[in-house]
Amino acid sequence: MTAAWWSACASLALAQDLLQEPAPPGGAPGLPLSLLALGYLLLFLLARTYLIACPSRALARAQLLGLRAEHVEGREEGQRQEGDQEKRDAREDIRECLQKVRDLLEGRGLLGRVGALLSLLLWNGKREMAAWALMHRAERRAAALMGDEEVRARLVRGLGELGVFPKGERAFWEGRLRCALGMGQDAQPGPPSRNGTSYQVLPAGTLPSSPDTKDSGQVGPSSPCCPKPDPKCCPKPDPKAQRALLGEFLAALYDARDTYYARLLTLHNKAAWLLLVGLGLAVALGSFVPGLPNGLSLGTALLLGFLGGLLSRLFRVVATKELPTDYGAYWVPLFLAPVLGALGAVGGYLVFWALVEAEVLGKGLKPLLSPPAAYGLLVALGFSERLLKGLTERLEEQALKQEDQDKGKPQGDGDERGDQGGPKDQPARR
C-alpha cells in the first residue's frame, strides 16, 4: 500500500510537470525529488528486510527448532508411556505452543507462506513478538519435565540472569533464589556475573544440597556458602517449592524480556512512521515551495542536507568503539539521519537567513546565504544537529527580546494627554 501511494504521488508529479512549463532555476524540483524519495523508501524497506527482519526471524526459528528437538520430536512414544498426567499435559501444551509458533514464522499452506514472506518486507515485528511469547510459555511448561537436580541447576543459572530486572525486583528475586537453594541471605559475595549480579560460585560438578543428599560433599546450609543459616528465613530446600519458585521466576524473567523486545519493536515502528512523514514532507516542499531565498534551489538544499546527515552517521559508526547488538535498534538513527539532515538543512537555512536579515548575526556572514558558499552551509546544517538547535535558540532569544522591548515602550501621545489633563471617568453614584 505504501509503495502504491508513493507511485501515485510520482504519477501526479509527472502529470503536473508535463502540463506546466519548465520550472525556472531555483524553482520546485517536482518529479526528480519524488523519485529520489521513492527510491530511498524502497532502499529502507529492503535494508530493513534483509538486515533486521530476516535475522530476527532466523533467530526465532532456530530457537523453535531447538525446543522441538528437545521436547517434541521423538517423544511421542515416551509420552504415551509416561505415568504422570501432569507431565503428559505439560508436554502436550508444549507441542501445541510450538506448532503455533511454526505457523506464525513459516505460515500454513501456500497463502500462509506467501503472507509470511510478505511480512518480512512490511515488517513490524508482530509475528516474532508473538512467537517469542509462545516459546517462553513452552519453556515455562518444560519446568514440569525437569528432574530435581535440573531444577536446582536452573535456579543457580537464574542468579546470573537477574540483570534484566529493575533494582528492587532484582534484589527480591536474588533473595528468593538464594533461600530456595539454601544459600542464605548472608552468603559471601562472589565475583559479579556478566549481568552485574554477585553470587558465590559453586565448585564444578556440585549443586546446592537437596533433602535426598546428606554428607555428599555438595554445597548446603552448613557449607561456607551459608555461614549463618537461618531456618526461619531459609528453610531446608524442598524440591516441590523449588519447582514452583522456578515456574514463577521464569514467568517474571520472560515477561521482562518480552517487554524489552516490545519496546524495541515500538522504536522500529516509530522510526518507520517518522521516515514516511519526513519523506512526504520533503516531497510536499518540493511540489509547493517555489525555492529558497537568493535563488537557491530547494532540491539542491535537500540533497546537500541529506549528504550532511549521512556523513554524520558514517563518522559516528567509524569512530565508535562498541556497537550495540539489540535486535537492530542501532539501525534506527542510521535510517532517520539522512532525512533529518535534509529537512534540517532547509529549516536551518531559513532560520540563518532570518537571523542575518534581522542583524542578529554579523553582516560578515551574509555571503554564506548565496551559492557557492551556501552549499557548505547546507552540508553543515545537515551534519550538525547542534548547529540547527543553536540557530533556533538565537532566533527565539531575539524574538523574546524584541517582545520585551515592545512591552517596555511608553504609550502614545493621546494616552499621555488623557492621563494628564483629560477628563477621567467618574464612578457612577448610587
Image (cartoon, helix red, strand yellow):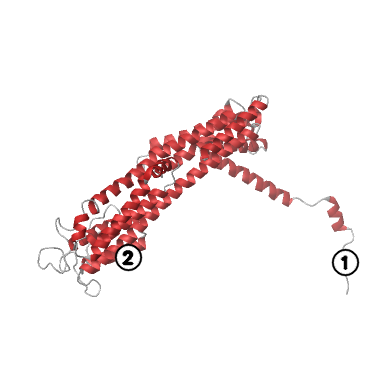
* Placement of the C terminus among the 4 image quadrants: bottom right
Percent x, y of residue 343: 56, 37
Percent x, y of residue 198: 26, 58
The residue closer to the viewer here, 61 or 31, is 61
- Residue density around tag 1, few if under 14, some if 14–19, many if 20 or more, within 10 Å: few
Q: Residue at x 26, y 64 (%)?
A: 177
Residue 387 in sight in this render: yes
1 vs 2, front mark:
2
Q: Secondary structure at mark 1?
A: loop
| Dot 2 amino acid type | Phe
Labels 1 and 2: the sequence-earlier one: 2
- Name the image quarter holding residue 79: bottom left
Residue 426 - label: 1
Q: Which residue is mark 2?
A: 172
- Name the image quarter holding residue 201: bottom left
Q: Is residue 150 left or right of residue 163?
A: left
Q: Are marks 1 and 2 in contact (CB under 8 Å)?
A: no
- Residue density around tag 2, few if under 14, some if 14–19, many if 20 or more, within 10 Å: few
Quick check: 335 above or below 78? above
Residue 185 in sight in this render: no
The residue closer to the viewer here, 75 or 223, is 75
Q: Residue at x 79, y 52 (%)?
A: 411
